Amino acid sequence: MMLSIRQQPFRTAVLVLVWGWLLFLVLAPNLLVVGASVMTRDPSTFIALPLNLDAYRQLFNPLYLDVFLHSLWMATLTTAICLLIGYPFAWALSKVQKRRQMLLIFLLIIPFWTNSLVRVYALKLILATNGLLNTALLWLGWISEPIQMLYTQGAVIIGLVYLLLPFMILPLYAVFDDLRQDVLLASHDLGAGHLATFRNVIIPLTLPGVLAGVMLVLLPAMGLFFVPDILGGSRSLLVGNVIKNQFLDARNWPLGAAASIVLTLTMALLMFAHRLSKQRLGEESS
């Protein structure tokens, strides 16, 4: 009883800290962005009254619509590549010994110790015309002249996959690690082959991890504006570039805020789909 009384102030302090963090550093900034998106552009103060939806209407301009569709295509391609690489990697990672798993996970998260901007610049040195990759290929005799890899869409895709691949692997590893082996054995005992077991058992059970990985890769891939700036030049624009340009260059804060809200709503839809998939999986398993 005395211990619970002593723990009460600590619990209250933790709740106050968490709710204060959510209110002032999450909710309040998002409300400010929502407010800015429905205000009028002003050259002197950036935003002003009256309230309107002009910024959202501007998003349907063919110029911005093309950028959004191009960003969606680039992000979808990045997500697909991360899934194709991350799914078998996470499955193989879940099969090794626990001691080796910790080592491999440690190696997987080591790049997070370095700023992502620094890593993209390092990748630029590798992909440059006189970079490490072209130098190695020339030395091996596989090519006769340097390949133009930098400032292309392919370079942007490589950069996005390089930065976001761990965010696909980690949630997939979590679901593979929790995958019950007796369910797989039961599937084989009932006459299902490897392909049928994979299609009818493994994929449905790992679908929440797939959706979580897609959610962690798709939206950030549309917003990482510095990757196209460094690796793609001005040839590959993402929604993140539009938001940055509207806030910092064009000083059109309502349009930049409206684009940010669209990305936030897209993330909310993905989270809702993820929750529905988990509920459906729970109903089927019960």
Image (cartoon, grey):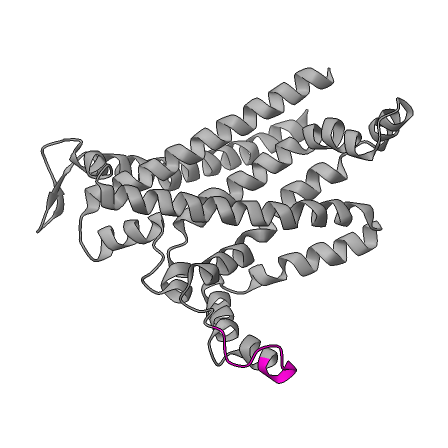
Identify the residue at image location x=56%, y=22%: 276
- Chief SS of the magenta region: loop
Q: Is residue 257 left or right of residue 229?
A: left
Q: Which residues are magenta?
A: 138-147
Q: Nearer the viewer, residue 266 or 198?
A: 198
Q: Is residue 103 visible?
A: yes
Expressed as whole percent of the image width and height from the top left, the position of residue 113 reads 57, 63
Q: Is residue 7 left or right of residue 20?
A: right
User: Is 115 placed above or below 74 here?
Assistant: below
**Which quadrant of the rendered structure holds the N terminus?**
top right
Expressed as whole percent of the image width and height from the top left, the position of residue 28 reads 32, 37
Total count of labels: 0
Q: Hey, which residue is sitting farthest right in the picture? A: 189
User: Is 286 placed above or below 181 here?
Assistant: above
Identify the residue at image location x=46%, y=70%: 121
**Which quadrant of the rendered structure holds the C terminus?**
top right
Q: Is residue 247 left or right of residue 52?
A: right
Q: Residue 217 magenta-drawn?
A: no
User: Is 279 placed above or below 199 here?
Assistant: above
Q: Hey, which residue is sitting farthest bottom in the picture? A: 139
Expressed as whole percent of the image width and height from the top left, the position of residue 49 reads 10, 35
Expressed as whole percent of the image width and height from the top left, the position of residue 62 reads 23, 42
Q: Is residue 217 left or right of residue 199?
A: left
Q: Is residue 256 visible?
A: no
Q: Hey, which residue is sitting farthest front in the picture? A: 144
Identify the residue at image location x=56%, y=36%: 10
Examine the image and state in which quarter residue 57 appears.
Answer: top left
Q: Nearer the viewer, residue 140 or 265?
A: 140
Identify the residue at image location x=47%, y=71%: 124
Q: Nearer the viewer, residue 148 or 262?
A: 148
